[in-house]
Amino acid sequence: MTDLKSLDELGRTLDPPAPTPPGRLRHRVLTEATRPARGRWRFTTPRFGWRLAAVGGLAAALTVGVLATQVVSFGDRTPASTASAADRILAGAADQARHRPALTVRGDQFVYVESRTVTMSVREGGPGRATISPALRRIWLSVDGTRDGLLRERGDSVTGREDMILPGCQDGTSTYRKYGKPVQVECTPTPGYHADLPTDADGMLAYLYRGADATKNPRDQEAFTAAGDLIREAYLSPASLAAVFEAVARIPGVRVVGDVTDAAGRAGVALARDEVQGVRAELIFDRKTYAFLGEHEMLTQGAYGLKAGKSINSTAVLKVAVVDRAGQLP
């Protein structure tokens, strides 16, 4: 499913009111459709790093991050691409995750995630009409999915500030705003926290592959994307987060691509997998501790006047917490 189709489906849901879209679709649109488009936008590949834009009726935009990624030597060797190097990093990441303190989570609370992003919105006509938009992004997701969450982005003087209410689902309905008026749609709650995720590598690997046959993309690509979807703007228990990294180590095609600097300026090492859409998806880990830092994508093929090697959708995770109300800072 492309994100353009995702937006179209949500649009049909809102006008006229109809049953709510699937949980994963609803979460992706509500938490990523935040940047206003001006004029007519073009859209392409459906991977996780290609953000959405919403203005009045929902529209789609290609947004491109400007994180400078430099491939350099890994240790005392040239950039590593062997399975053993990736396994070593993912094993370290799993061990680091497993030793994190577990948070107590109640259904009436919110998962809070703070991140630094750098994006570039590209209008039809190519990079000459691009807008670079660094931002501090904060999101509050209802743990049980019944309460209104909040997405808050603070950019520079150009991008300004954006707030978006993320409607919860109560008594089978959610209330959205359309043209300034409330619109109710049928729904089922979309929890911001899942306590029942697998805690072992075998179970997590099966979990990541469970929807792999639902698209025309390669199954291994879908599993890697599912891993990114699972840990993005989320709190996972230490055991489940460790299981994600152990499962990723078993997905074919995952390799080390070298040292990078994330959107917050932190040094890391990237594990990546190439996608058939001409994008390289990367997970970034701390160079020394292997703690998960964030995500990054880059074009492996030219698109919309952008050359191969252009970085897209850089995100650096700064803080993950559980708080009592939307808008509360930990």
Image: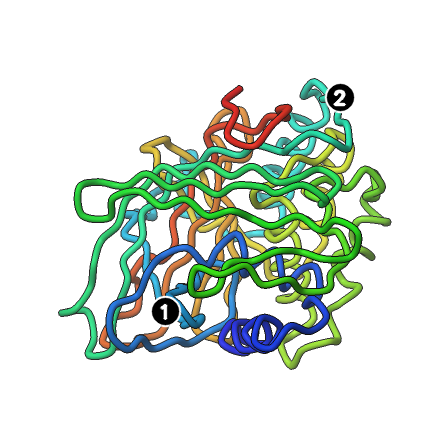
Q: Relative to 92, say whether 211 is above or below.
A: below
Q: Is residue 89 above or below residue 99?
A: below
Residue furthest to the front? 181
Quadrant, the N terminus: bottom right
What secondary structure is marked by label 2?
loop
Q: Is residue 268 above or below residue 256?
A: above
Look at the image and name its color scheme: rainbow
Q: Position of residue 207 (x, y in %)?
A: 80, 55
Q: Few, some or many C-alpha atoms within 10 Å of disc 2 (few <14, some 14-19, many ≥20)?
A: few
Q: Is residue 271 left or right of residue 94?
A: left
Q: Tell whether 256 sits left or right of 251.
A: left
Find residue 198 and report its image quarter: top right
Disc 2 or 1, which lies upstream in sequence? 1
Query: Disc 1 marks which amino acid?
Result: Ala
Identify the amino acid type marked 2.
Thr
Return the mark for residue 104.
2
Q: Nearer the viewer, residue 205 or 51?
A: 51
Please give the residue where the numbered disc 1 appears in the rendered image: 61
Q: Is residue 34 left or right of residue 126?
A: right
Q: Residue visible at 61% across and 59% down? A: 225
Instruction: Give coordinates of residue 329: x percent, y percent.
Output: 50, 22
Is residue 273 or residue 88 the one in the foreground? 273
Q: What residue lies at 39% left-to-right and 75% top-to-bottom?
A: 43
Give x and y (percent) for residue 122.
26, 67
Q: Residues within 10 Å of mark 1 (few under 14, many from 20)?
A: many
Q: CA distance from mark 2 to mark 1?
A: 38 Å
Q: Seen in the image, is 103 located left or right of residue 231?
A: right
User: Which residue is at 72% across, 44% downward?
Assistant: 146
